[in-house]
Image (tube, rainbow, N blue to C red):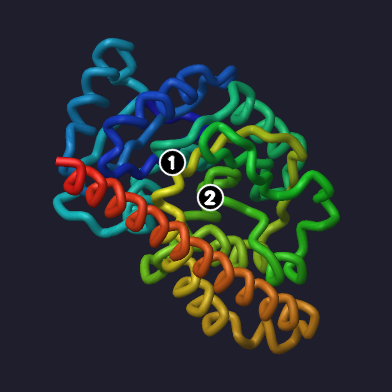
Amino acid sequence: MGKQTVSIIMPTYNRQKTIIASLKSIMEQTYTDWELLIIDDGSKDQTEAVVQRFITEQAIAQKVSYHKLLQNSGANHARNVGVKLATGKYLAFQDSDDKWLPDKLAKQVAILEEEPTAAICLCQMATYENDKLIAKTPVDEFSAVDVTLSNLLQINFASTQTIVGTSSCFKNNLFDESLPRLQDWDLMLRLIQKYPIVYCPEVLIEQFISADSITKNVSQGIRAFSLILDKYSELYAKNKFAKYNVKVVRAEFKLQQGRSLLKLAEFYYNRLLRKFYKLTSQ
């Protein structure tokens, strides 16, 4: 592949059912000067075959490369592999089960080009569960003046997919592979202390989550949250308001975990109940 302005890094693992929609959203970008690096983190399903067929059908082998890792090592490791392989001036990240809106790259690259001192551009992301909008990250009230270390210590307002930045930012600041989740928060806490960051106040990404993944995500999130608190303990100690807000967020995490476990218990109870009725009706 020739050198493109933007290198898009897409980690994937067992996403044969969702990855094509994500690929199509990249193909539909109005900004076309990009390369895509798909890093397969050791998928056991037909993800590779599905993607290779799509590459052939769309005749995009010159823009898309597929890299299959020998073993599953986690999305952060896969992203780091992509960062090291990337050749573009800017790097962007896409998950294999989410969608970009058509103007995502065009708008974020334009902002970076207009702000030569800026190294990173963030945008908004809309999150859906069962086709229902449940959140926006950051919230609508968020503005460029809110992109501060103090605010970032209190809440994670940057998801990995919302970030487009200069190659050097990411090559010099790889993802922390020890974190089970919240790698985007950890990365931004490091980047915001080193580089100017600009904000595009538009939803340019659609994220889709399923109910059956909530329990796992919350559990991993609590563990990752604790690791981040330990990692940045000195920064939190200097910011009393952030320190207080962290207690609130920790309580919210535990509340979510309780709700998720309740949902899981209700699911298994109903399943057992159906089996019981089936057996007693025979």
Name, please, the residue furthest toward the front. Answer: 281
Q: Eyeballing the image, is 165 above or below 150? A: above
Picture quadrant of residue 87? top left
Q: Residue at x 48, y 35 (%)?
A: 98
Q: Which residue is mark 1?
A: 95
Does residue 245 appear in the picture of this structure? yes
The amino acid pointed to by label 2 is Thr
Instruction: From the top left corner, tell me how far across and down residue 185 is, in percent.
Output: 57, 62
Taking the spot 53% from the left edge, 40% from the top edge, the residue there is 129
Quadrant housing residue 72:
bottom left
Gap between marks 1 and 2 measured at Cα: 9 Å
**Relative side of 109 to 151, left or right:** left
Q: Nearer the viewer, residue 256 or 195?
A: 256
Q: In the image, is 184 to the left or to the right of 117?
A: left
Tell me the crowding category of disc 1: few under 14, some 14 to 19, or many 20 or more residues within 10 angstroms, Cα based. Answer: many
Say what secondary structure mark 2 lies in.
helix
Residue under pointer 2: 160
> Residue at 50% across / 54% down in the picture?
170
Indicate the position of residue 1 as horizontal and vertical percent values. Answer: 33, 26
